């Protein structure tokens, strides 16, 4: 029952309980929320499918990564590679467009794949400054990131950290190559 006292309308406890019960009944009719499917690991795709995924992204190192990925291949990604990405839910084909485009899951998978491949192929590039305010950040496509105080010396301060990162990454790749066992050809 509704009572008014000046401009304020109040409802009795029974009316409030009835409204609450109605809302609970409506909520029970709703479908339960489905959990998100696990993210697709794009590093398990073939090299042509990986190249097709990366051709649909926009990044600073896209061409370098694709060139390194397809060094040994004679062909470029073809329509079957793009269709495979569509079946996996990473891309979709719009009828009026000439090419496929990435879905949200495809953008996430492409970004993760690019990060892995940049580390694997030793591709490093300092990007920035990003942000405003007291601190700005610089990053590398392989995943390195640093925040420095925003001033006229910010790029120089970030460059010191980036050089340390690049030297460590280059040293680690040389170490991995040195630790690999020699393959002997028996013939």
Image (cartoon, grey):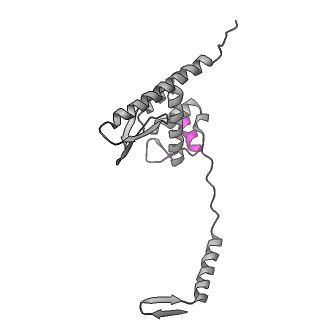
Residue 38 spot, x, y in % from top left: 63, 47
Residue 73 visible:
no
Residue at figure coordinates x 29%, y 38% from the top left:
152
In this view of the protein, which residue sits in the foreground, 70 or 152?
152
Q: Position of residue 84 (x, y in %)?
A: 58, 39
Say which residue appears at 57% left-offset and 20% top-offset: 175
**Vertical order, 40 against 12 (above or below):** above
20 left or right of 147 in image: right
Left or right placement of residue 115 versus residue 153 in this view: right
Q: Nearer the viewer, residue 61 or 57?
A: 61
Can you name the residue that lies furthest to the left here?
Answer: 152
Residue 25 among magenta residues: no
Depth order, front residue of 72/161: 161
What span is in magenta? 74-96
Compared across the picture, whether 146 is left or right of 16 comes to: left
Residue 166: x and y, percent?
46, 27
- Out of 137 and 18, give the one closest to the viewer: 137
Q: What residue sits 39% from the left and 34% below the top? A: 158
Is residue 163 at least partly visible in the picture?
Answer: yes
Q: Is residue 85 magenta?
A: yes
Q: Quadrant of the N terminus?
A: bottom right
From this viewpoint, which residue is outermost toward the right?
A: 186
Residue 74: image location, x then y, percent:
51, 22
Q: Residue at x 43, y 48 (%)?
A: 96
């Amino acid at each position: 029952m509704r009572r008014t006292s000046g401009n304020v309308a109040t409802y009795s406890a029974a009316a409030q309980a009835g409204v609450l019960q109605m809302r609970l009944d409506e909520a029970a009719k709703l479908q339960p929320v489905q959990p998100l499917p696990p993210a697709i690991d794009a590093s398990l795709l073939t090299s042509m499918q990986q190249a097709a995924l990366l051709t649909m992204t926009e990044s600073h190192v896209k061409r370098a990564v694709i060139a390194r990925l397809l060094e040994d291949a004679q062909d470029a990604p073809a329509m079957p590679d793009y269709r495979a990405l569509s079946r996996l839910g990473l891309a979709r084909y719009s009828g009026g467009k000439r090419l496929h485009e990435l879905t949200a899951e495809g953008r996430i998978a492409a970004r993760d794949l690019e990060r892995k491949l940049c580390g694997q192929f030793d591709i490093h590039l300092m990007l920035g400054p990003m942000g405003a305010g007291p601190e700005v950040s610089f990053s590398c496509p392989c995943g390195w990131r640093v925040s420095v105080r925003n001033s006229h010396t910010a790029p120089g301060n970030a460059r010191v950290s980036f050089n340390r990162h690049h030297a460590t990454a280059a040293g680690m790749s040389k170490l991995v190559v040195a630790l690999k066992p020699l393959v002997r050809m028996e013939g």
